[in-house]
Every structure is written in C-alpha cells, then in structure tokens.
Image (spheres, coloured by chain):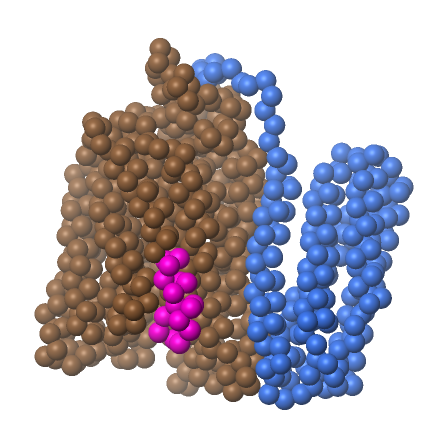
Amino acid sequence: MSSSAITIPGVQIEDKPWVDTLHEWVTTVDHKRLGVLYILYALLFLVVAGVEALIIRIQLMFPHNHFVSPQVFNRLFTMHGTTMVFFMGMPILFGFANYLVPLMIGARDMAFPRLNAFSFWLSALGGFLFYFSLVGANGLYGAGNAPDVGWWAYAPLTARAFSAGHSTDYWALALLVSGFGSIGTAINIIATILCMRCPGMKLSRMPLLAWLNLVMSGMVLISVSPLTAAQIMLVIDRYLGGHFFDTQAGGSAMLWMHFFWIFGHPEVYILIIPCFAFMSEIIPVFSRKPIFGYPVMVAATVCIGFVSMSVWAHHMFSVGMNSYANSFFTITTMAVGVPTGIKIFNWLGTMWGGRIQFKVPMLFSIGFLFQFLIAGLTGVMLGSAAFASQLTLSYFVVAHFHYTLVGGVVFGVFAAIYYWYPKITGRMLNETLGKWHFWLFVIGFHLTFDLMHIPGLLGMPRRIYTYEPGRGWDTLNLIISIGAFIQAIAILAFVANLIISYLKGAKAGNDPWDAWTLEWSISSPPPPYNFATVPTVASRRPLWDLKHPEDPDSRYE
Amino acid sequence: MSAMANPFPEAPTTWSLPDRGKVAMAGLIIAESAIFTIFVVAYLFYVGKSLSGPTPSEVLETPILYTICLLSSSLTIHGAAKSLARDRVGAFLGLWLLTIALGGLFLYGTAQEWHRLIYKHGLTISTNLFGTTYYSLVGLHGFHVTAGLVMLLVVAIFALAGRVRMQESRRVEVLAMYWHFVDAVWVVVFTVVYVLGR
C-alpha cells in the first residue's frame, strides 16, 4: 500500500526488511492503512466469533447434547455477541469510513490522523483485553475464565456476589476502552466531513456514504457515551463497593437495563446505517443510474438518527414498565420503520429501469434489500408490546436480530468488500469464487435464520444450552446447524478469495466499475497523498462530469 | 489520472469550512454531555432511596464561594482568549494564570468538602446510594476540572516560555470551549446536588 504513484526512472527501490514494514504499519497515521488495519482486525474477530457460533450450533444440533458444558455455553454466547457487536461490527464499519470518507470528499487524510491511530489502538486494546480474560481471569477456583453474563450483562448478575473472579471486569473494561476508541473515531469522522471537504463539495453534493457516516458518528457520540457511563458505574460497583445496581442497598436493576438499551438500540442503527451507505453507493453504480431521491435519503437517515434514540425500551416490554411507557415505545418503534421503508423504496427506485449488472457486490446488495426488509417486518412485529410479551426471550428474537445483523450488516459489509477491494489492493476479487461465496452464504443464511423463527414461535427460549427431545424443535435445530456450517464454508471461500486474489487477481486499474465518486479518480491502491492536485467538484457525481463533459450532472443539480 | 493536470472543474472562488478544532471539541462536548446526563439521571433517580444515612440534607453544605470561583473562571478564560486574539500577550498570561488559580481553588473546595464528609460524617462511596451517586457525579466533574487544569497548565508553561503568540489563539479558543463546558456542567451538578437533591 505504500507504493507511491510517482516512479522515478533509473532508481531501483530496494525491498524493505519485514521489520521496517511492520514498524510502518504499527506507527502509521495514514487513514488508508488504519482503515485496512480496522478491517483486518474485524475480519479476524469475525472468524473467531464465527467459530464460537459454530460451537453453539453443534451443542444445539441434537437434544441433550454434551458437546460443551452449560457454563462454557454461557461464556460462548457472551463472547460471540460481544465480539460481533464491538470487535467485528463497529471496527469494520469504522474501517470503511476511515478508508473511504477522506477519498470521497477529496481530502488528504482525516482531520486528526494521530487521534485516528490512537482510536484504532484503543479499540484493538479493547478486543485484546476481552480475549485476554481467557488467561487473565483464570485463577479463582470455580469462577470461570471468560465473561458469561450475556452481551447485555443485566444487573444484578454482574455484581461481585454473582460474578466472582475477574471475567466480568474484563468485559466491562474492554467495552469501556473500545468505547473511548469509538468516540474518538466518531469525532474524527465528523470533523473530517465538516471541515476537510474539497472545494465545491457542498453538503448537498457529498456522496451519500459521507452523509450516512456523518449521521452514524453523531449517533455514536450520543449513544456510546451512555454505555461508557454505565460501565464506569459498573466498575465503581465492582471495585469501590458502590451501589448503583445493588438491589440489596436500594439500587435498581432496571436502571442498568435502561442505560444499556439507551446505548443498545441506537447501536443497531450505528451498525446498519453505514451498510445503508454502502447500498447507496453500490446500487446506483450497478444499476447505471444516479441514486433516486438523494435529498430524501439524507432526510430519512437524519430522521432515523433522531427517532432511533427514543425506541430503546422496546427491549424491555416484559420487565414491567407501565402501559404508558409500553405504548410510547411501541409507537416510536413503529415510527422508525417509516424512514427505513423510504430508503428501501429509494433503492428500488434506483434499480427500477436501470441497466442492472449482476456483479458480486450487486448480488450481495440485492440480498441485503430482501433480507433487511424481512428483518424490518419481524422488527415491527416485535416492536408491538403485546406481541413482544409473547415472543420475547425466544428464538424468534434471535432469528430477528440475526436477520438484521447477518442478513443486513454482514451482507452489506461483503458487498462493500467486493466493491472496494480493487481500490484497496489494486486487484479484482475473483468473480467465480465470489459467486460461490454469495450463493452458499445465501443458502446457509436462509436455512439457519428463516427456520430459526419457527422454534421461537413454538416456544424455544433463547440462551438455553440444551433442550428436551420431542417438542418439535429437534429437526429444525438440526437444519439450523447445518445452515450454519454452509455459511462457514461460504466464509472459507471468501477468505480464500481474499488471499488468492491479493496474490493473483486481475489488475483493477483506477476505475473497474465505471463509478462516479472521487476515490475512483486515483490509482488503485491510492498513493499515500491521495490526490496529486486538490480536486474540485461541481455535482454529486464528479467522475460522471469528467467522463461526460458534453452532459455533466452539474447542469441539472 | 493523478499525474495529469487538474482534470476537475474550476474551484469556486469562496470556499471556507469550519475550524476542525472547534468542530471536534463540539463533538467531544456532545459525547461528554451524554455521559454526564446518565450520571445526573442516576443521581436524581436515587434521591431519597438510600436505605441508611447520612442523607444529603444532613451533611451537604452549599459551596457558594467555590462555585463563584469556578464560574468566574469562565469569564477570565474568555478574557484571556480575547486578549490573545488581539495580540495582548501580557494580559493573556495574567488572565490565564488567574483562571488556573480559580480552578485550583474550586478543586481545593471540593477536596475540603470530601474530607469533611469522609472524616466527620463517615460518608464514603460505599456507605449508601447517596454516597455512591454523590461521589461519582461530583467526582466525574472534578476529574474533568483536573483534566482541564492540566491542559491549562501546559499552555501556561508554553506561555511563560514565550511560545504562545497570536497565531495560537484558535487553539486556545478550543481549550476555552472545554473550560466553559466544565463550568456549564457544574451549573447542572450544583442544581441537582445542592438544590434539587436536598
């Protein structure tokens, strides 16, 4: 990635020793390298947490299975959930934001390159701390050596009396540290977008990816901070003998739930909005049409940002809030579906009448559209207090949020990787392997998560480590687990594709997709300085203007 | 394409963007406000819910003097930043040091209050819910005052060495924003702890 675009004839550049390369990567403040570090770090955790999911599915494959003990099962779902949200989901999206936002707005780097590196290494430290608990929390007999309180870590289970040893401390500290990293990156993204745009790049001409990341970063500021505050309280409780969540001293377990979900629900929008951003860049390019309803897309995103701040307690319909609170949170939850529906409508409007090219990024995008729609529909079902009272804590809920996070976020991330990999590495990902990856993943995904709704409706509770035979769950659970393994094979194809294409892939050139945003105007991989001359833009599709001087967008906007 | 002459259209003649330091500080202030909001909510939620004493009305005394110190330090730092912007370095340094002194006095006041609560009334963070919420809310604010003072001191050291000139005034203004925020939080904490909470 360090290769400069300018080569001086007659000068042979010697290969650097690997220690120098490593040193360059560790000390880098370049937004592109940090973006790549974020993405690689997240992919590592995707594999780790994926393996945890596979072990969970092996355990649940048959009734009365003894693959892992109940204690280990608790640790596995805690590690899986926490890792996927904090150490896979957020870092990979921050990685793309880091890599793409400066390139798309024509900037040299992020607004604060050193803060950027600091934030990344804080996040990395968080992930390290979390998994170091496997070693560091060991010692107290019977206390367990990994967090086992669930990713939501409800009080008073996290109190010293019920979670002895240090595993819960590692959980709290890991999230505290990575939370600081997230806030740092969010501030950086906001400052970059507002203060580093190239001449002519008005807010109304910014690529939607930049807009959506701006909204996402604003949400990080407002909603990750409450988690940070709650973690500080939890640490005070555990180390200083405080009573925030100590029910025996008058503390309230409900308060933790509120604080956690004030973070926890906006968090799912923090994860999905950058994927909306990928869709808004990829679908127009492969439909060969400009995005349909740009201002409405921006307005809908800002609207989601606001409304999603007031829906958190729909996670708590069964804990005994009064009927006014239940009604309020039902209404707001229904309301947040409206701007989301507008966005899906607009993507369909973009595809409508377009000359659609079914390349791998587009396949994943189309998968995203269908699956996110279904996830949204089950979300509306669960958003109703009456319905949620029946199905909360069942596998229906597990199926719903995996539909959003796998069917939505993971598909969006794969689309983004297939779309921008040529820019990042200079080589195309293999289309054939990519199609294998896509179809295997789609089949595995639907086997697993479509069927998972049914045991939920039949009453199978979540978080159980095994179940009785003969309740009608057996066959379904077996097929769900088989689906999980098909997904794992798809991921293997994906990793193989990443490696093989990096070594032997076809050269990408500057602009393999005939796209319209600024990052495709420079070489692949981009030179360290990004743009040799500061670009100026006159429309939302600067490269279209460049390629079609006889009919530029700027004439119509 | 980067090797070509600028292929993009002519740059607009007027193109100005906000100062990134101020935008970033505004972002930090939003995030910090959210953190304080959670602590304030916890404080208000637990008012009167302690199962044992001491209670706020028994032991808290309103720190009027130290509050005046902290709030007036907002005025002095504003004056300092304005002086620097007009290249009056001497006035800047004087007001800057005064700000540090006022902030230090406020911290001293907090320390004195905590000493009294701990040694005279036996109230610690683990005594009851009041102790837990009081020390964490006031302590979180005190931590921000301390962090602010460290940053102010760094600037003061550079200023005493003659290295802070007019061209640094934008950076100083960013720091002043943070200090104003710390003061504004104190207004909230004061209202919640010493007025509403009793």
Give the main secondary structure, helix, strand or loop, of the magenta stretch.
Answer: helix
List x then y, in percent, for residue B69.
Answer: 83, 60
Magenta includes A478? no
Image coordinates for residue B66, horizontal then vertical, percent:
82, 65
On screen, residue A544 above or below B155:
above
Q: Which chain is blue?
A: B
Q: Is residue A251 visible?
A: yes
Residue at 27% in and 33% down: A350
Residue at figure coordinates x 38%, y 47% from the top left: A273
Quadrant where the image shows the N terminus of chain A = top left
Of A136 and A104, nearer the camera is: A104
Occupied quadrant, residue A244: bottom right
- Seen at 75% across and 78% down, the residue is B60
Nearer to the camera, A206 or A111: A206
Can residue A146 be seen in this snapshot? no
Identified at 14% across, 73% down, the residue is A473
| x and y percentages locating residue A525 in the rendered image | 39, 32
- Chain A rendering hue: brown
* Vertical relation: A340 (above or below) A47: above
Extreme top residue here?
A: A550
Residue A46 in the image: above or below residue A246: above
In the displayed structure, A177 sits above or below A96; it is below
> Relative to the observer, which residue lies in front, B26 or A376?
A376
Residue A340 image offset from top left, x and y in percent = 34, 47
Q: Nearer the viewer, residue A212 or A516?
A: A212
Does residue A27 appear to the left or right of A138 in the view shown? Answer: right
Q: Which residues are magenta?
A: A317-333
Residue B37: image quadrant is bottom right
Name the image quarter holding the C terminus of chain A: top left
Numbered marks: total: 0
